[in-house]
Image (tube, grey):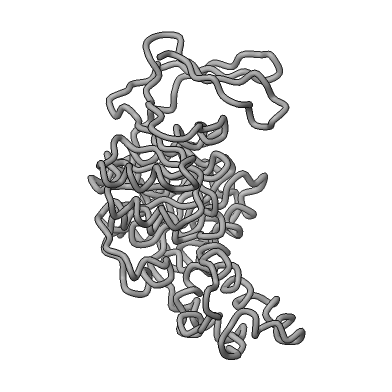
Amino acid sequence: MNEMQLKYGCNPNQKPSRIFVEEGDLPIEVLNGKPGYINLLDAFNGWQLVRELKAATGLPAATSFKHVSPAGAAVATELSDTLKKIYFVDDLELSPIASAYAAARGADRMSSYGDFVALSDVCDKETATLLAREVSDGIIAPGYTDEALEILKSKRKGTYNVIKIDPDFVPAPIEHKQVFGVTFEQGRNELKIDDELLSNIVTENKIIPDDKKRDLIISLITLKYTQSNSVCYVKDGQAIGIGAGQQSRIHCTRLAGNKADIWWLRQAPQVMNLKFVDGIRRPDRDNTIDVYISDEYMDVLAEGKWQTLFKEKPPVFTKEEQKAWLAQNKGTCVGSDAFFPFGDNVERARKSGVEYIAQPGGSIRDDNVIETCDKYGIAMAFTGIRLFHH
């Protein structure tokens, strides 16, 4: 089959709609559901991301995609009890690929609501069980166990989108897209991202440990499939904050840094000890936690609404307490898809525990950026490559 008819394009009024290849067959098989235009954009971008993460690290990889940018991405690592709890998977058995997806979705659960999932490895029962209770639009993977497929086919009243991708499919080296009736053509971005890109360390601190190199590689591969401008914070094998599609670099860095901060604050004792009312749904818990660690919680207290959320009244998590907790976050890595034009990006990244940076370099203010890194002992590599994605 070389084409697939779709219900509509990005919006219901955009008809007709289809995907097709000019030669050979489509590299996918729809095992369940009827994926739409945006679903398939997310699926193909997500598949490329996890395929590259697996090739670069040798570890099973997963990503959670929304609107053609990853909300999260991760490789398989052993999750701590704390992370299992804040990702709401402490009651599940987790295989390596299930752990990768739990981390990919868990870092920014609000953005992952209604995501499209991509897995580098065969989807197993453990991953399907995790997915069965989350709000998600679909999944793409190179295969599914019989048990996993049975679980996924029953999701969303039998309409959940399940796509099998041919892992051996090689796309044409030239790609095309149309805008306003004009066809654009370019060579595919086949740039290989590996440790070699981190060899040009321009700061006084020249030491980047192997696990931090892995995290920087994860950030760069994630950025390769994130709508630009973009910045990605990574810690312990998972993206903890992604800022996508911003017009200025500092806004990317702030957006991603704020997400990384929320990820860290969710692990604070004040948050871990929250006692929610019985029957509260996971998405509502996510929203409630965000309210609790924000200024909105004061309004909740003033209006007496805390009883609709919590079994007992939680004490205020003060700004001073939050600042002290955030100061404990260390060893974070950050990647940028284009150069940092000013040292303010480094200043903001440092506040979220960043100690290692990978960015292309090439700004007329590189000296200022390097000087800012040196002020804090941050190690920074100039990759020499840009990773814009549009």
- Asked whether 64 or 227 is in front, the reply is 64
Question: Image quadrant for the C terminus?
Answer: top right
Question: Hey, which residue is sitting farthest right in the picture?
Answer: 303
Residue 12, position as x, y percentages in the image: 69, 30
Seen as rendered, the residue at the extreme top is 23
Image quadrant holding the N terminus, namely top left
Q: Residue at x 36, y 41 (%)?
A: 50
The answer to whether residue 230 shows anywhere in this view is yes
The x, y position of residue 152, in whole percent, is 38, 45
Query: Where is residue 45 drawn, in percent x and y?
Result: 46, 35
- Residues 305 and 348: in front is 305
| Residue appearing at x 60%, y 68% in the figure | 287
* Image position of 259 (left or right of 202): right
Q: Residue at x 55, y 64 (%)?
A: 283
Q: Is residue 203 visible?
A: no
Q: How many marks?
A: 0
Vertical comparison of 145 with 107: above or below: above
Determine the residue positioned at 57% across, 73% down: 289
Q: Nearer the viewer, residue 230 or 66?
A: 66
Asked if 15 appears above or below 41 in the picture, the reply is above
Locate residue 84: give its quadrant. bottom left
Residue 60 coordinates in the image, percent (x, y): 27, 47
